[in-house]
Image (cartoon, helix red, strand yellow):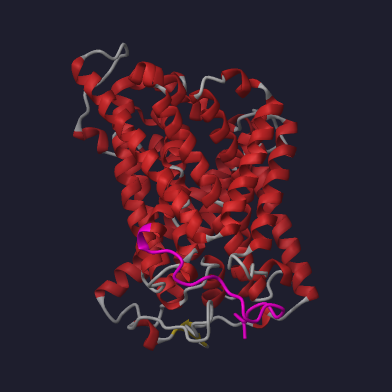
Amino acid sequence: MAHDRVRDEPDVGLKPNAIGFVDALVIGLNATSPAYSLAAVIGPIVALVGIYAPGVMFASFVPMLLIASAFYYLNKVDQDCGTTFSWVTRAMGPWAGWLGGWAITMTGVLVVGSLADVAVSFTLLAVGLDGWVENDFARQFLTVLLIIVMTGLCVIGTELSAKVQNVLILLQIAFLLVFVAVALYRVYAGTTGFDSIEPSFGWLDPFGAGGAALTGGLLLGVFIYWGWESAVNLTEETENSASAPGKAGLWSTVVLLVTYLSVAIAVVAFAGTAFLAENAGEEEFIFAQLAGDVLGGWDWILLLAVATSAIASTQTTIIPASRTALSMARRQALPQHFGHISPRFRTPDVSTWWVAGIAIAWYLIVNQISTNALFDSLTALSLLIAFYYALTGVACAVYYRRHLTESLRNFLLIGLGPVVGAGLLTWLLVRSVIDMSDPADSYSGTSWFGLGPPLVIGLAIALVGVVLMVVWRLRDAVFWQERPGVADPDLVHATVTRPDGPGDSGAGKGP
């Protein structure tokens, strides 16, 4: 059977009912790293669209909500921790499914090191050790140590991970709320020291800055929501697995929208558009610059908000990559040892440590090239994210194709919505490729093979994935014997029960 457990561990699976809906929601929120994401994009977005930055963030929310709907409905008929990999395989066949799984795994590899680096840097700034941030050896050593510690928490158990995440999200949101409240108070009190602007509802108009600026802003804004699907990757370990993980993913996008709009309005109002545009190149350290101006001697509050955000995301970003690798190995799309589950902790220990190890190697190697090369590798993330999100949206409509006309709800939420979301992301993917082809648009401003480094990195990752897929197909063809199916009508209208164990819902049937 496609979902059979790894043969040498027949009685060991992921721990069911390890976490609840709230835990899954928190993990989905933390995986997006709200404070860090805001710090990273608020300057560049303001540079493009000015006061309409909150509106662009609202527009960026739309494709995320539509794709979150696809995750919700696909999870209802197939609670597999591999999410996109499993669903796309069922709907569109093994080749597309394998590439979707590869994209998810590599996003974790590319970003974990950067997240840990930001976590270390902002923690050091918060405690007054600014000199350590400039010391490459000290910072990189602490970054690697943090990755190892957070990976260990992932392996020790999902419950412990959830408890840590609950604390981190409370701290993060509390710090951000303090920042928003003080910033807006000082705006209306006229004590900012900047060219502050009183907020207006007109800021929520995403078309206020014009079409070209909106396109550039969306390319930045849509990816600050990335990561919420980590909640669904824990579906086999969540109570009410047929509905709770999908709902957690949906609600996390809504909570993120409210958080992003609140902070964006406060930052634009306090600092004004000129300051933010001039400092757009400072990326996440824009918050470090504003912390003292807004909070005075309490600037450590905002610094710790970014630090806790990045620490939490360092841990949660490992989850989708490791669970996807587990799912792929379980279906013999990857070597068997990636599917090993710890008998003691009931977590995918081998795949988790592999993801962390490759992420550490990537972080250290790219840093030796240059800091700009690390930023370029993060920019390449947009290609992978848009690809597997769009693939999931299409897979939802394809898998449910025989049920889309049964009701208006089905047509809108399962068919049209996910397809529109996929279309928007495909458009953004094409725009990203066009923009990244110009070396001048990269962080380093250098040319690799006549193209921008981010595009070269993205294409290289895709090429390596295709090569590995073909090699594994030649070595073990079992996975490629699967055929696309459609959603079973009995499972579309009922809560899924899975007596055969994790990952084997029997949710599909031949066309």
Above/below status of 218 relative to 468: above
Q: Where's the N terminus, which quadrant? A: bottom right
On whether residue 185 falls in the magenta region, the answer is no
Q: Is residue 483 left or right of residue 227?
A: right
Q: Is residue 18 magenta?
A: yes
The answer to which image quadrant residue 115 occupies is top right
Name the residue located 49 percent from the left edge and 71 percent from the top edge. Answer: 236
Q: Position of residue 463 (x, y in %)?
A: 71, 56
**Residue at screen point 26% across, 38% down:** 205
For image coordinates 28% across by 24% down, the residue present is: 183
How many numbered marks appear? 0
Report whether residue 265 is seen.
yes
Q: Quadrant of residue 355?
A: bottom right
Q: Give the range drawn in magenta.
A: 1-22
Please state which of residues 240 and 289 is positioned toward the viewer in this rendering: 240
Q: Is residue 189 left or right of residue 222?
A: left
Q: Which of 381 and 75 is in front in this view?
A: 75
Residue 66 visible, this angle: no
